[in-house]
Amino acid sequence: MAAARPLRHRSDALPARVDDVTNRFRWRAMRALGLCRWLLGGTVRALGPGAATASSAPSPQDGVTVEVLDHLERLALVDFRDAEGVERLREAVRFAERLREVNTEGVEPMDSVLEDRCLYLREDDVTEGSCTAELLKNAREKVEEYFVAPPGNIPLPELEERDTFLKEKLPH
Amino acid sequence: MKLECVPTVSELGSISILGQITNISAALKEGQVTPTELCQRCLALIRSTQFLNAYITVAEETALKQAEESEKRYRRGQPLGELDGIPIAVKDNFNTAGIETTCASNMLKGYISPYNATVVQKLLDGGAVLLGKTNLDEFAMGSGSTDGVFGPVRNPWSYSRQYKEKIVPRSDSEPENSNWVITGGSSGGSAAAVSAFTCFAALGSDTGGSTRNPAAHCGVVGLKPTYGLISRHGLIPLVNSMDVPGILTRCVDDAAVVLGSLAGHDPKDSTTVQDIFQPFALPSLTDVSKLSIGIPKEYHAPGLSSEILAVWSKAADLFKNAGAKVVEVSLPHTHYSIVCYHVLCTAEVASNMARFDGLEYGHRSDMNKSTESMYAATRREGFSDVVRGRILSGNYFLLKQNYEDYFVKAQKVRRLIANDFVKVFGSGVDILLTPTTLSDAVPYVEFIKEDNRTRSTQDDILTQAANMAGLPAVNVPTALSGRGLPIGLQFIGRSFQEKQLLTVAKWFEKQVQFPMIQLEEVKKHDNGVLQHQKSASFS
């Protein structure tokens, strides 16, 4: 799997994997730990009056699988920490479902309230800079004029080896 | 009400109709008080109100130096302007050169910025004295100023005579320690600093109501300018398409003075408009008969306290009785604005928080195995639950499979919300009048019973549609609640029509005569007797 980078552009977002290995692991984990019940429990609760209005729309909690959670941790490089963290995400998704109720037929998305104006571009002249020493002051590890980073091109460890709460959802 | 003389230092607390900054500026020119004295008084007051936890960093040395410089200028008869020598405070998510900028987060503890945010630079260029950086919710995410790593901010009104008089004493608890109320957020520190007289104006930021909400709870004026009017360069961003620097002052005139020195195009911020900005002094409106005030019915939101509803109605009647045209209007997509905001905010936050990786600045983890794991560990250690929660939600909404259904959908709903306002203003309404908050400030122990996200969705309901549409809005303190705490009302104006907005706000402020806070600390501090207006109050 390609090394995950922090989400800087939407094209970085990769779809969830659907290969066999993943599916097998998923079903095993869910059967063994009753994870199915845990996730479905959330789904059943969500099917209240506030949930998706169209009967054919997918249940809101379909999107929040262990796979997606793992994927999010990699993309964001931020961890869920505990069950509360995961629940927070599910709440957020549930809340966002209300958007489906709005009819946006023929409406263009709005990026900025200043869309009717031209974006200002400066002349391509250097007006400031030469402050290397100042900028380096805030970095913890540096050598001469370089920021020092640990070795790159090493992907984040798989779920089994990572120090993450989601690991608890794996079969032992 | 006549202003008899320029107030002396011992009357620092008295309100005057001409605006406090203008008065003090005149006093400085006349030599009745010096910038150094002013600065020292404010610093001493900051020390004695430390229990409010309004300040994260107090820049005592640099402030005194700036005051000295200002004094030299006044002696030469060459002050830089109305803000010369005026003590101000800045929210801790604005970069300030040489002074720690933390955003109340472990991620930026110890971070000393190499540059000043444009708004900070403008204030300093005008001679203002920067007293310190104020407390906030971590990275400005929250509506209570309770979620920063330096602890919650206490509302100065918790210690006011007005509030203490109304508390039913409980035999087993100390009112001092358990009854204190929140400031609202996320610019709570700035609001508390202004409310407790420790500075004359403070900068906040407003993304979903973060300036107006604490302004309402702390009884001060909170202005959210039009998006694109004031530079965001140096303001650590939360939501690029909605953030604006906010202005907190004790009266509307002061807000206009500060706005005058901050507004205008900045080549370093390409989202500032290029229109020439003319600073203005506010006229004293006497005739409101040509004004059309809109009352959006959807702002009668579920959970709105009956007290605030009553104050809102009274305000509408006030305008009607003065001859203005008061009409009920509709902003039909109002109840979707909070959901829309929730999606857009978390999505932009996910992107903006990606810059914190420990390499160039801020906290860096000791983990050294790989770049990825170092980033992950740094972010794990540096961000609080609230911040991490929003980043993860944002990334979820931005996943390829969710992008259309959530992010783009929210952008479409945003257009509908903005169009609602366009329609209403296009129908002849000049200003909208709405409540700012659902209730007066709640006690801290009550507030923390719900989590940050729930609270934000509840508390931002009345304020964030203005951020969606980029419109200017201002909170004007209106009356005291039954518990002795401030209630504010919000005016929303047309894009870039701050002069009209503030003129109406100033007229309203004069009508309601909001009472001054009666704080022991301020009284103890001033040698003279504190003057306060006992005029007919609005409630």
Image: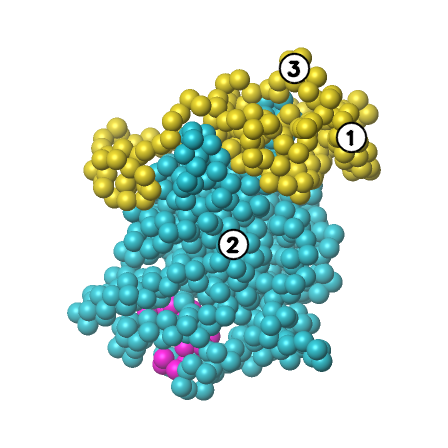
Chain colours: A yellow, B cyan
* Residue B272: mark in rendering: none
Q: Nearer the viewer, residue B526 or B176?
A: B176
Q: CA distance from mark 3 to mark 1?
A: 20 Å
From this viewpoint, is residue B211 visible?
no
**What residue span does the magenta drawing correspond to?**
B8-25
Q: Secondary structure at mark 2?
A: loop
* Residue B148: mark in rendering: 2
From this viewpoint, is residue A16 visible?
yes
Q: Examine the structure image and report whether residue B225 is included in the region drawn in magenta.
A: no
Left or right: residue B512 versus residue B69 is: right
Q: Which residue does the image show at 29% across and 79% down from the upper left?
A: B32
Q: Quadrant of residue B309?
A: bottom right
Q: Which residue does the image show at 67% across and 72% down from the upper left?
A: B483
Inspect the image, locate mark 1, and give the three-letter code of the amino acid beneath it: Gly
User: Mark 3 vs mark 1: which is more N-terminal?
Assistant: 3
Q: Which residue does the image show at 49% across and 65% down from the upper left?
A: B53
Nearer mark to the viewer, of 2 and 3: 3
* Residue A21: mark in rendering: 3
Q: Output the chain of dot 2.
A: B
Q: Secondary structure at mark 1?
A: loop
Q: Residues within 10 Å of mark 1 (few under 14, many from 20)?
A: few
Inspect the image, locate mark 2, and give the three-letter code of the amino acid beneath it: Gly
Specify the farthest residue to the front. Answer: A172
Q: Nearer the viewer, residue B513 or B112?
A: B112
Q: Secondary structure at mark 3?
A: helix
Q: CA distance from mark 2 to mark 3?
A: 43 Å
Q: Residues within 10 Å of mark 3 (few under 14, many from 20)?
A: few
Q: Nearer the viewer, residue A21 or B111?
A: A21
Nearer mark to the viewer, of 2 and 1: 1
Inspect the image, locate mark 3, and give the three-letter code of the amino acid beneath it: Val
User: Picture coordinates of residue B513 (x, y %)?
Assistant: 56, 72
